[in-house]
Image: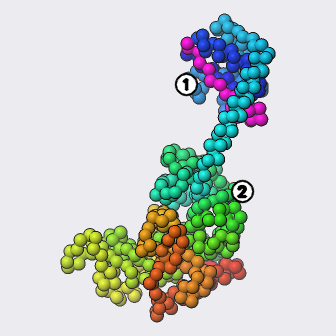
Amino acid sequence: MAKFVLAGKADCPLYAQAERLADTLQRTLPNFKVHKIPVLPSEWERWLELTCNKNGWKHEESPLIWRELVEQGGKGMILGGYNDFVDHCQVYYGVTSKIPDDEMETIVAENLETQLSLIAEEQHRLSLIHPCNVWITGALCLTSQILIPFLLSDEAFPDAQTVALHLLHLSGDEEDMQTLKLDTEDLALGLLYRVTVHTDLEQAFHEAHVVILLDDFNADSENESDEARKQRVKNLSERYREYGRLIDGRADKEVKVMVSGMSFVNMRCSLLVESAPSINSHQFVAIASQLVNEVRAVLADKLCVMPSDVKDVIVWGNISGRFVIDLRWAKVFNYPGAIRVPPSFSQPVLRVLYDRKWLETEFKPLVHQQRQILLSNTGRGAAISATNGILQVLKAWHGAYGPDEFFSVGITCTDFYSLPHDIIISAPVTCTEGKWSLLKGVTVEGKMLEELDLCANELQQVWHNTHTQNDLLLTKYC
């Protein structure tokens, strides 16, 4: 079977004549097939250059005609222009064609009108699509790669028609970014509208509806010098200030912003809030799920249950530094006590955990140790746990949880037990109609309030050091 491809400017008379000749042959010869590619005059030169470069051809005029030796889109053999096509048809098929000028003008006009109409229809179709623009920074990290398939689901974005995924990794390797783009597209998930990749801030956060920041502070090695460490902290601070300014100027005013990671989580979130004054501060949250899960894992080991059996643990304070563990609301399922209870039955953790000395002396050091074990064994943070925390916050923002379900997340401190205003502090919150609020009925007093004051003081110190460039003190609080 002979399959020919005719490409040319939509207003080109020679393209119209080649088209007419090909139509004649296709009507009279059962094995002659033709595929036409009319191109707008303004786009022709760029299209021709890309096509010739891709196939290793040389051609400078309209039309361009080639014969496909396999199915359409496969390897082809170039014939050349109009005259080459006429000669080929005359030699192989004994057919030639000459169109009257008036008929040729009609075909040219129809080609151009049809192409303009198709473009207008496509533009109209695209104008009806309003994707949810999701930006991920630090896109080459493991958390991002685990997170992406879950983001492209109705569960994460129940009200979105489609999701446009924008992946940003500053100074990222272009080849790695393109590979990530292709891997994401190969998922073939129905909610995905498009994927774009970026290694600079030129387009960052344009019309963003959701921003997930995964850039973290990770020392190159344990032997990293103090000077190198100071510079990395300074660079991280400057980067997040610039992120905040760009979010303020480019993102949707209802944008939802999440900061995740292992180090300086509260500080990074605070820098964003300060640098984006036109965005409501309650639209920024710091993810505390990794810390909460570390607490649950230590408790589960002590109580001889699975971590999933420990619920409603509260963490106050600095997610990456000094924090307070609040077990007053925590409960445990499937506790192996003297009496076996149904799986749906829970008991307060403080009722079954009799070892108060362990709680006061060993508990928190074991939580710190839990994180250090992970870092030393893998050299990275808890990517799966971070992914779960991000998804949990997204679902809460979109109304997936009831008013009685609460989470520990870092939010702007306003009227929290006389604590300093405008710092980001982890606290138990509920989410109703997309708004975060402190868990009703929870009180902090006595020793716990004193510990929380120390957490707030540490956060203020970090904040002060960030603004005075006191890097030596700042590095204490990673």
**Residue at image point 22% right, 74% down:** 341
- Image: 212 above or below 21: below
Count of residue discs: 2
- Image: 118 above or below 235: above
Q: Given the image, on which type of amino acid does mark 1 rest?
A: Glu
Would residue 88 be found to the left or right of residue 392 on screen?
Answer: right
Q: Is residue 246 magenta?
A: no
Viewer-closest of 53 and 288: 288
Residue 15: which numbered mark, if any? none
Viewer-closest of 194 and 184: 194
Q: Disc 2 designates what residue?
A: 202
Q: Given the image, on which type of amino acid does mark 2 rest?
A: Glu
Residue 71: which numbered mark, if any? 1
**Residue 182 placed where, x, y %?**
56, 45
Task: Specify whether residue 241 is in view.
Answer: no
Alpha carbon distance from label 2 to label 1: 40 Å
- Give the residues in magenta: 30-53
| SS at badge 1 | loop
